[in-house]
Amino acid sequence: MVHVDTVPAQNWREWVEETTGVLLDVREPREWEQGTLPEALLIPVSQIMERIDEIPADRPILCVCRSGSRSHQVAAFLKFSGYENVANMTGGMKALGMQK
C-alpha cells in the first residue's frame, strides 16, 4: 500500500502557498460547477490515466474531490506512478461547505 500525506481541508491554502503546489480537482464537471478552489486544475478521476501528462511532475500536487475518497485514490495512483510530493485534502469540498 502506498502512503499518501494528508492536508486538512481548512489548510489547503497554506499548503499551496508553502509548497507552490498545484490543486488537482478530480471531481466530475457537474460537481465542479457547484464551486471550486482558485486555480484548481480539473481532471476528473475517470480521465486521470489518459491525461496524466497534464499533471506537473515537478510541483507538489494536492488532490481534492467531494469528500476525500476519490482524491485519495488518485493521490495513491500518482505516488505509485512516480510523483514524489502528492497529498490528499481530507474531507474534500464537503469539509469546506462548498458541496453537499
Image (tube, grey):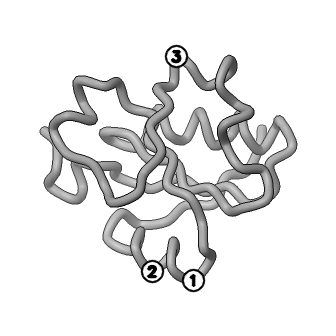
Which of the 4 image quarters holds residue 60?
bottom right
Q: Marks 1 and 2, how far apart in space?
A: 6 Å
- Residue 14 is tagged as 2
Percent of width and height locating residue 25: 44, 42
Which of the 4 image quarters holds residue 96?
bottom left
- Judged left or right of residue 62, residue 54 is right
SS for callout 1: helix
Amino acid type indicated by mark 1: Glu
Assign the N terminus to one quadrant of the image: top right
- Label 1 close to label 2 by CB (< 8 Å): yes
Compared to residue 14, the image places residue 31 above or below, namely above
**Which callout, 1 or 3, points at the residue further toward the start of the chain?**
1
**Which callout, 2 or 3, points at the residue further toward the start of the chain?**
2
Residue shown at 45% from the left, 80% from the top: 14
Residue that badge 3 annotates: 46
Percent of width and height locating residue 97: 14, 55
Q: Nearer the viewer, residue 27 or 88?
A: 27
Residue shown at 15% from the left, 38% from the top: 34
